[in-house]
Image: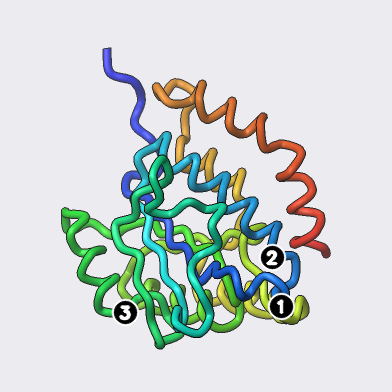
Amino acid sequence: MAGPPRRLASPVLFICDLQEKFRPAIHEFSRVVSTTQKLLRAAQILSIPVFATTQLRAKLGETCPELQLDAEGGVKTQAHVDKTAFSMFVPEIREAFAKLGGPEKKEVVVVGIESHICVTQTTLDLLREGHKVYVIADAVSSCNRQEVPVALARLAKEGAVVTSSESFLYECMGDAGISEFKEMSKLVREFSGKTKENLEALCKM
């Protein structure tokens, strides 16, 4: 007998400009990477398509190595594109995104940097296209930490869902009866300590 359907029908993960050269400049960069690692593991379990970008790769370097994007044994992306635009939704990403199939709108979860520039402009572009956008508060940051709550408040008003990584993962599943729940539950437990630390560092009230 088939299990229950997932709550989110067409989730997609967008990873924005998590490049090695940004590490010293971004507030709690390692925490953003840690949460993104958890989301990438979940993407593998739930077969969620992954898109990634770099900003001016020739000057600012590759995506940080611990994410293992497109590496042997890592996560294969639908597109891993270098850009000069601030928004991730550049033509190469749009083209690959369109190949996901079906006319239905997607549920796009956005992580990365910087919250008030590239994350904001990516989210606004996706919202204009009619997609539902989740911005993960424990997986975005900026050079100046004060920019983050300003950006998240604006994006919430624009119609994005600002939430935590764990909340998104459970919403994505929607039912403990799905076949992947046991593996997902194990992942959540494995990251429980890091999740708490990342929330405390990135989501201070």
Which residue is at the front of the view, 89 or 134? 89
Image: 189 above or below 143: above
Disc 1 to disc 2: CB gap under 8 Å: yes
Q: Where is residue 171 shown, x and y percent of the image?
A: 50, 42
| Label 1 or label 3, whichever comes before in sequence order | 1
Q: Where is residue 110 shown, x and y percent of the image?
A: 49, 63
What is the three-letter code of the residue carrying label 1?
Ala
Q: Is 102 on the left-hand or right-hand side of 122? A: left
| Residue 90, numbered circle | 3
Residue at the disc numbered 1: 25
What is the three-letter code of the residue carrying label 2?
Phe
Q: Where is residue 198 shown, x and y percent of the image?
A: 74, 53
Q: Residue at x 52, y 30 (%)?
A: 184
What is the three-letter code of the residue carrying label 3?
Val
Instruction: Work out how far the residue at label 3 is from the one at label 2, CA to CA, in angstroms.
Output: 24 Å
Instruction: Work out how far the residue at label 1 is from the one at label 2, CA to CA, in angstroms.
Output: 8 Å
**Label 1 neighbourhood size at 10 Å, few (<14), some (14-19), many (20+)?**
few
Q: Secondary structure at mark 3?
A: loop
Instruction: Work out how far the residue at label 1 is from the one at label 3, CA to CA, in angstroms.
Output: 25 Å
**Label 2 neighbourhood size at 10 Å, few (<14), some (14-19), many (20+)?**
many
Which residue is at the front of the view, 199 or 2? 199
Residue at the disc numbered 2: 29
